Each structure stands twice: as structure tokens, then as C-alpha cells.
Image (cartoon, helix red, strand yellow):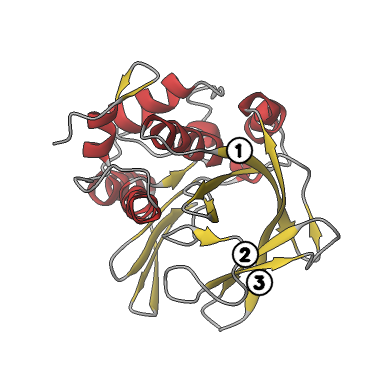
Amino acid sequence: MHAGPKIGGMDAAAYLARIGYDGALAPTAATLRALHRAHMMAVPFENLDIFGARRHLTLDPEAFFAKVVGERRGGFCYELNGLFAELLRALGFEVHFLSARVAKGTKAGPEFDHMLLLVPVEGVRWIADVGFGDSSLVPLDFDLDGPQGEPASAFKLVHDGAEAGFTSMYGLTDAQKWVERYRFALVPHPLADFAGMCEYHQVSPDSKFVQNRVCSMPTAAGRITLSGNRLTLVENGRRTVQRLDEAAFLGALRERFGIDLS
């Protein structure tokens, strides 16, 4: 295991062990790509604290670390990208927080609806995002036209595709249709700028995180998702859905995600 640098006084070695990473740590594009993939494959996107009103979440990197690493939990964008940014900075990367507006049909949500990362390295402006759920396993090249990402060519960035000054991130659906996921401007923000929307997503009855519980993570063959009372497995392009009672839901959380809410 890496001895690793400290993350704001926290142990980077524990973080790297949490995501099962034992590769290079030099601040290169290859390292960024490998860390991004490892994080996505190990840490689920989940809102179980919000839906169950189990814990109030604040923009505190030490709390992010305690939950994701110490408790082996997941989180939503502010937690996951906030913590990943701390790791990258500890390793010597330059990192900036960007505000995104989540797409809702042809419209988009408010500013700071979602948080993603800009990581300039080796002359390329990488868009890193480990906190959106079903998104690219690896960073996207901001200046690259056309399909990219992982799964192969399943994502793309369209500049000024929605409105002037914004870049839209699109994902390819199972039906091979391009759907806008969110739009963002290349304007850095401090973490504190996201506090209002972090609060909104936890308390507003209009927040999807209050309305429905979800826990989702990619797998080697596709993706596994617990949502509401359903378990959805996507394996090699084949989708199966199973309805669960509460005991089975909690059992699936333990067995498939390593999360014990008891």
C-alpha cells in the first residue's frame, strides 16, 4: 500500500486502499485517468442519508473522508467530487470546481445543481466527474470534438450546444440516442458556492434526492442500481429488474455495495 501524502491531515493511503488503487501517483494524465476509474468502480453514487433523513450533509472534506473512506459509504456529487478533488490536490494536481445545471428535457436546473471538476494536466483540460452516477469512467477532454470516454465513445461534450457560453455533456443511451446530462461553464468556483444547492437537495420536497432513494455503481459488465424498491442489473447490454421488499433491499445494499444501514 502507498504511504501516500496527507489529504488535509487525512491519510491518503486509506483513501487509495478504499478505491483499490496501487498504481502510479505522479500528477499525470495517465494517473488521473486510472484514479478516476478506480474511484468510479469502488464508490457508489447514493443518497441514502438524504432520503432517510439519517444525516445532514455539509461541505466539509473531513466529513466526506469519514463517510466514504471510514464508513465505506458512497455519496452524491458534492461529497464524491469534493473528496476526489482533495486527493488530486494532495498528489499535486491543479483542480477547480465547476458548476453544472442538470438537464431536464430541453431546459436545465439552477446553477450549482451539480458539481464537477476541471483538472488541467499535460496541456489538456480534463473534465473529471466521479459524482454523477451513470457517467464516464474516465475524464473527458474538454477540447475534443466527438464521442469519447468510457464505455468507449459513450459520451461527448458539445460547446455552446444549449446556450452561449455553456458546454453540454451528453451520454449515449441503451437505445443509442444522445441525451444531454448537464451543461456547465468553464468558470472556477470555491466549494462554499455550492452550499445553497447542497442544502436544497436535502430539504426541498422538489429534490429528487428527497423523493427517491438510489445507490448505483458501475461493474465490469455494466451497472448495478438500487432505486426505490427495485434492483436493476445491466450486464453486457442486457437489463433485468427485480422488485424487492424492505428486507431484501437492505440485504442487497449489504451484499452488493457493502453498505449496512442497521
Residue occupying the point 62% across, 64% down? 143
Q: Residue at x 73, y 42 (%)?
A: 206
Residue 250 position in % (x across, y down): 33, 43
* Chain-order first, disc 2 or disc 3: 2
Q: Nearer the viewer, residue 64 or 87?
A: 87
Q: Which residue is mark 3?
A: 179
Residue type of the residue flagged with mark 3: Val
Tell me if 218 is positioned left or right of 169 in this view: left
Considering depth in this image, is 104 or 24 the residue closer to the camera?
A: 24
The answer to whether marks 3 and 1 mark residues whose Cβ atoms lie closer than 8 Å is: no
* Up-down relation of residue 246 to residue 223 (above or below): above
Indicate whether 197 appears above or below 148.
above
The C terminus is located in which quarter? top left
Residue 108, disc = none
Q: Which residue is mark 2?
A: 143
The disc, 3 or 1, on the residue closer to the chain's N-terminal end is 1
Question: Which amino acid lies under the numbered mark 2 shown in the image of this protein?
Answer: Asp
Return the x and y of residue 17 as percentages of the image width and height.
Answer: 21, 38
Seen at 56% across and 22% down, the residue is 58
- According to the image, label 1 marks what residue? 97
Real-space Cα separation, disc 3 to disc 1, in angstroms: 24 Å
Query: Around disc 2, counting alpha carbons within 10 Å, would you say few (fewer than 14), some (14 to 19), or many (20 or more)?
Result: few
Judge the density around disc 1: few (<14), some (14-19), many (≥20) Cα neighbours within 10 Å.
many
Which of label 2 and label 3 is nearer to you?
A: 2
Q: CA distance from mark 2 to mark 3?
A: 20 Å
Q: Where's residue 131, x and y in %?
A: 50, 46
Amino acid type at mark 1: Phe
- Indicate whether 116 appears above or below 155: above
